[in-house]
Image: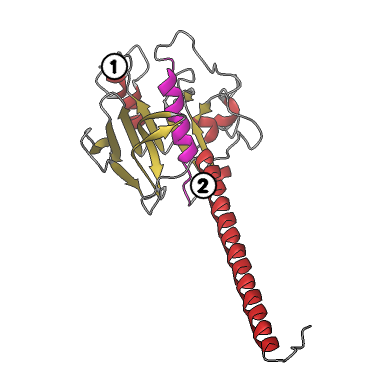
Amino acid sequence: MYQTDPPLAAKETLPTMYDLPSEDPEEKGLPDQFHLLQPQLLADTFLPPNYKQEEIFTGSDMNLYFDSRHPLWYKRPDWFAVVGVPYLYEKRDLRLSYVVWQESVNPYIVVELLSPGTEKEDLGQILRDVEKPPGKWEVYEKILRIPYYAIFDRYQSEFRMFELTGDRYIETLRSTPSDTNSRFWIPGLELGLGIWEGSYKNVQMPWLRWYDQNGNWVLTPAEQEREKAEQERQRAEIERQRAEQEKQRAEQERQKTEKLIAQLRALGVEPEID
């Protein structure tokens, strides 16, 4: 292959998401029901007010290709968010994977959900084999330099947040099951992440979800619809009560008028009635 002058950009010479495999059925850690529902809740409530929805992409259990020198290397985060990129790939297509040298923007936050098969890698507790690709921790911290790395252990109801400080992650939050305010605010997103005890998809348990600057949990689309329906019901009830009050006032006025007419006639006065 001949070198062009000037050299072609990496986006033009390296493989795209169409060229790279998007799944590996042999890979361990395939999602269970929790690993399907929790990322949905994170995506449903990820509404940073300082970004338009068409400038946000979230992915879950999707190949994240991170090294242009080794284009077949990838990681599969349980959930990640990128801001400042088109929602659709090149504004026209659903993504098969996320290829950083094509997108030119790295994820802003990644969330891993601990499971027995992946826990040590998620926490960076595995020594790297130089003959193999780096682990998740090294990729997130050293290669992609993702600003925030969250880990959630549903078995222990434990939420840990790591923030990139300099060249390494510093643990800035570690909750325990007894914590009543396990929350972490991210200024760059104008959103916070915390543990919410509630029912999602008819499952009652602690969940990781986003909250706004007022401390309120960001509503899912289904919750927004229910809230809208409840507001409509309340407005209709107020209108019904107002109409009933008007009806009662009209009836009272009618009765007062009839009483006055009867009194005038008793006095021999015939009132003029329109």
Q: Looking at the rendering, in which quadrant would you find the C terminus?
A: bottom right
Upstream in sequence: badge 2 or badge 1: 1
Q: Which residue is mark 2?
A: 227
Identify the mark at residue 139; answer none if there is no mark.
none
Above or below — where is 55 with respect to 5? below
Quadrant of the image containing the N terminus: top right
Q: How many marks?
A: 2
In this rendering, position of residue 174 left or right of residue 9? left
Q: Choose top left, top right, bottom left or bottom right for residue 254.
A: bottom right
Count residues near mark 2 (Cα–Cα under 10 Å), then give few for <14, some for 14-19, many for 20+.
few
Tags 2 and 1 touching, CB below 8 Å: no
Q: Quadrant of residue 210?
A: top left
Q: Which residue is mark 1?
A: 128
Query: Where residue 94 appears, x then y in whole percent?
Result: 61, 29
- Stretch in magenta: 30-49
**Magenta stretch, overall SS:** helix
| Three-letter residue code for mark 2 | Glu
Taking the spot 28% from the left edge, 33% from the top edge, the residue there is: 159
| Residue 245 in view in this figure | yes
* Mark 1 neighbour class, 10 Å CA radius: few under 14, some 14 to 19, many 20 or more: few
Question: Type of residue at label 1?
Answer: Arg
Q: Residue at x 36, y 13 (%)?
A: 132
| Viewer-side residue, 215 vs 139 | 215
